[in-house]
């Protein structure tokens, strides 16, 4: 699974767990519902700002990890 798809899937799982609708989350994050749908389905490449808003609302944290090579 591609990184963008993984992120979208995690957002959707957390939103569902918190029983928040797509419309509610989109409104709280000040993004369009179509944008949120595309993020959750891996069809969009969201900005870091949008991801941070969504993560804050859902109680998630964005982290960066460096792979060992």
Image (cartoon, rainbow, N blue to C red):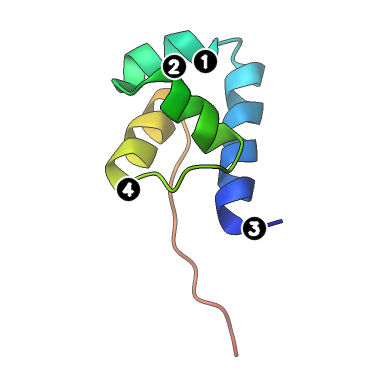
> What residue would you read off at disc 4?
48
Q: Along the polypeptide, which appears first: circle 1 or circle 3?
A: 3
Other-residue count near label 1 (Cα within 10 Å), few / some / many at <14 / 14–19 / ≥20: some
> What residue would you read off at disc 2?
25
Q: Is the Cβ of the residue at disc 1 closer than 8 Å to that at disc 2?
A: yes
Would you identify the image quadrant in which residue 64 lies? bottom left
- Identified at 36% across, 21% down, the residue is 32
Q: Secondary structure at mark 4?
A: helix
x, y (%) of residue 3? 59, 57
Other-residue count near label 3 (Cα within 10 Å), few / some / many at <14 / 14–19 / ≥20: few
**How far apart in space, not on screen, are marks 1 and 4 (Cα)?**
19 Å
x, y (%) of residue 44? 48, 43
Q: Secondary structure at mark 1?
A: helix
- Identified at 32% across, 48% down, the residue is 48
Residue 11's disc is none
- Identified at 59% across, 85% down, the residue is 68
x, y (%) of residue 50? 33, 37
């Amino acid at each position: 699974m591609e990184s963008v798809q993984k992120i979208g899937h995690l957002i959707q799982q957390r939103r569902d767990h918190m029983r928040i609708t797509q419309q509610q989350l989109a409104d709280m994050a000040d993004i369009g519902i179509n944008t949120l749908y595309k993020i959750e389905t891996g069809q969009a490449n969201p900005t870091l700002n949008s991801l941070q808003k969504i993560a804050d609302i859902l109680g998630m944290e964005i982290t960066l990890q460096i792979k060992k090579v």
